[in-house]
Structures are given as C-alpha cells and as structure tokens.
Image (tube, rainbow, N blue to C red):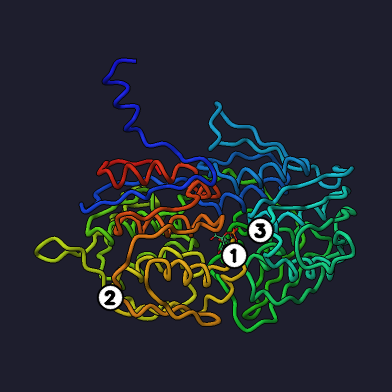
Amino acid sequence: MSPNLMKEALLVPMTPAPGEAWPAPFTTQPVNATVALPGSKSLTNRHLVLAALSQQPSRLSGVLVSRDTDLMIEALTALGAQFTPVDNDPTVLDVTPISLGATTGQITIDAGLAGTVMRFIPGVAATTNATVLIDGDEQSYARPMGPVIDGLLQAGVHITAQDQEPIGRLPLTVHGQGSPAGGAVAIDSGGSSQFVSALLLVGATFTNGLDIRHTGEHTPSPEHIDMTVKVLEAAGVVVHTPEPNRWVVEPGPITAVDTAVEPDLSNAGPYLAAAVITGGAVTVPYWPLETTQIGDRWRQILPAFGATVTFDPVPGTDYGNLTVSGTRTAAGRPVLTGAGELENLAELTPTTAALALLADGETRLTKIGHLRGHETDRLTALRTEAQKLGVTIDEGPDYLTFSGGYELHPATLESYADHRMATFGALIGLAVDGTVVTDVATTAKTMPDFPIAWAKLAAGEGRIRA
Ligand SMILES: O=C(O)C1=C[C@@H](OP(=O)(O)O)[C@@H](O)[C@H](O)C1
Ligand SMILES: C=C(OP(=O)(O)O)C(=O)O
C-alpha cells in the first residue's frame, strides 16, 4: 500500500467490536450535513409480520438491515415464510408468506433483545401447528411479556413457561394448534404499547378475530398502536375502535401490499440533536408528509430547546426535507434553552435527555415510567450516567427532571446493551471532550452504521448515509 493510501485507511472510521470502548467524537465546530436514514425498525418489523401472514407474495423496499430486523426475518423464516433479497440488495425483499397451519415440528426462535420480536412472534407462532420455543438475550428476561401472553391465553392459545416458572417473561413455548379461537380479551397494556400491537397484528387470522380491551389507565407510545392500525388497514384488515382503549379486529384475509418503508424518524433524533448541540444544521431527506412514527415529534421537541425546524416538501411526492438548525450566540456558542415539560416521549427519551443535560434551563420528562421495561431501566440508567458526568438529576417513578445549566465532566458512559443509551453517550461526547462510550456497537440493534456515520458527522462531512 502506498504511504498516502495507508494514511487514508487510517482516517477511515471503523466500527468498534462489540464491547469495545469508543472514544466519542468531539467537535467545537457546528455540524452541517444531510443525513440519509435507513428504514424504520417499527415499520419494517410490522410489514415483515404482515407480509408473512398475508395470502399473496409481496415486495418490501427500504427495509432496515439491523439486529432487530434480522431477528424478525429469522423468526418468520423459521415459522415458514421466505425472504429473498432482490438483486442481492437486503433492503429490498421478495416475501413468500407462511402457508397458514402448514408449519409443524419443534422450532426455536431467538428474540435477542428486540421488543417487537419477543412480543409480536408468539401470536404468529400460535397460527402454526408447531411447538415454538421463544428465547432471547439474558437481558430480555427482564422485559415484561405478561399481558401479551395473557391476551393470547384468553384467545385460546396454549403457552407454557420453562421449568414451571410463572408465565410472564421469556423463555416461553407456544404450542401452535392452527387458527386460535380469538374473541374478547382484556389486558393492561400500561407496560408497553407492544402488547396491544402484538394482538392487533395477528387478530385477523384468528377464527373470531379479536376484540381487545386495554384495562389500564395509561397507554404508553400511543403512536405505535396507531401505526399498527394503519399498516393493518393498508393490508385490508378491518379494525374498529368503538371507544378509547378498545380495538376490534375482524377475522379475514391479510392482503399483501408492496410497500416502501419510511426512514426511521426516531433514529433521526441523534443526528438532528447534533445540530442543536453544536449550533449547526442537519437535513433529513425523505421525511414523510404524513406518518404514524413517534419520531415526527422531533418537530415540536427540538424547538422547545431553542432550535428552528423547517420542512420543504418535495413537489409531486409524499415526502420532504426536514432541516433542524441550532441557535448560536453572536460569538458562535451554541445555545440550548430548557424545554419545560415534555410528556410521553417513550423511545425518544434518551436523546432528549442528552439535550436536557446540555441545556441552560429546566426540562421535565414525564409519563415515562414504562421505560423501566425497555432494553434497560432507562430512567435509572440516565440518572446513573448523569451522575458520572458530575450532575444529579431527579428520578421519580415515572419522570426525570433536569434543572439545567450543568457543567459536565468527561466520563466513561455505560451502554447497557441499549442502542439509545449508546447514542445518548455519543451526543454527550460531541460536546464534552474525553467522553468514552463502553459499547457503541450495541447500536447495531437498529443502526449498524451509527459509529461510522457519527464520526463522519463530527469530522464535518456534508453528506452522510446513516
Ligand atoms: O411497537 C413498536 O415498534 C415499538 C413500540 C414502543 O414500545 P413501548 O410502548 O414499550 O414504549 C417503542 O418504544 C419501541 O421502540 C417500538
Ligand atoms: C424500546 C425500544 O425497542 P424495542 O422495540 O426493543 O422495545 C427502542 O427501540 O427504544
């Protein structure tokens, strides 16, 4: 290799190995970039499930390639579906659906740490005639599963736990007996919207459909339930919502639809937040004009920290360019105000917490208690990592309060096998020189190229493929 090529090779950012400590890129310069995001995790995994349960083949494009979506593809393949990349492109898949009831035998499925896989797959397994063991990472055993199992039991599905344990966590075994009876089920979905989504997705394949009632007071991540209803309706499934917290899914065929998956607007968050933190500007292209993704809320959240958001629709399309610009003093110092109270931010919380730690004023994040059942207990994780940065934030049962105006010290920040805690660390590192993230490779859960894309952003590259 010539000396020049060798020098260039040394400058190409590498993805650290799992568990490898990562010195987070730091910059004093405003970032200015256009960042193209890969497909949405939540939409990809819903479309994969519906394509696998539908009656005809279909083609999905813009599919996210990541650990959570790979696990979903592997699970549905084990249950009898086929996914074939078109022209060797893993983001475009031809799907041959499961022949309902034809799958038999003993099957083992790895759900990893993916909420969508561990909650959505039991219902799909119930429609087969196979015995399906669903297991996951050790950390997945802490994530609540009870209401989705309970809902399926009420619908006539046979599910057992291992070793006489109470059924409420992974691992578990679904004893498929063809189409379950279905009917009326009542569950408390306060721990995760995915419990309702899981039942909604399979309801049409049950003999009597499903009449789902959420009995709890709080519905977390309601956008994700709306997303499920919308993708079902696009696949010809009839869903009635006769009253709040009740969804009636009529039995009937799921129609295959060729679908282009929207970019992941939740994962746009760290990049847009980087513009706010550095007083720069980041544009995300292909931002949908209309969407059920919770990440669309960045348009309200980031201005609460003092950013400006502009949206330029692309004529003749159903998308546009979303640009977030940070605010700077005349001397060029980035300015972040506190955001006041923001509620029900769900998966947007860790990124917003990074902004709150860097902001001048107070931010209160409320109605986020169920994040204790996410990849890790995110409330405790955020308080613990803030402590390492030298500040005390107030952690309540379902809220976090940041008084703002902190002086942060560099620290080694733990990732907790949580992609969003890793990106939280990267955001802090952009502003606090010397920050290290313990396991940035865990971002592969939904964004395998994050470490490289982030290094390019911090280095001032203008066009980035995230
Ligand atoms: O259905 C989905 O795709 C998701 C629902 C939400 O779960 P919760 O309701 O548990 O927050 C969200 O946080 C998660 O990242 C993805
Ligand atoms: C909670 C999340 O993921 P999961 O789909 O595993 O629940 C998340 O992505 O923030």
Ligand 2 rendered quadrant: bottom right
Q: CA distance from mark 1 to mark 3?
A: 10 Å
Q: Quadrant of residue 63?
A: top right
Tell me residue 133's x, y (percent).
82, 51
Q: Earlier in the sequence, mark 1 or mark 3?
A: 3
- Residue ID for mark 1: 374
Q: Is residue 13 visible?
A: yes
Q: CA distance from mark 2 to mark 3?
A: 34 Å
Q: Amino acid at mark 3?
A: Gln
Q: Quick check: 144 above or below 61?
A: below
In the image, taking residue 363 as reference, residue 213 lies left or right, namely right
Q: Amino acid at mark 1?
A: His
In the image, taking residue 34 as reference, residue 192 lies left or right, namely right
In the image, taking residue 239 as reference, residue 371 lies left or right, namely left
What residue appears at the point 85 percent right and 43 percent down from the top-left corner?
A: 103
The residue nearer to you, when weighing 438 against 211, is 438
- Residue ID for mark 3: 139
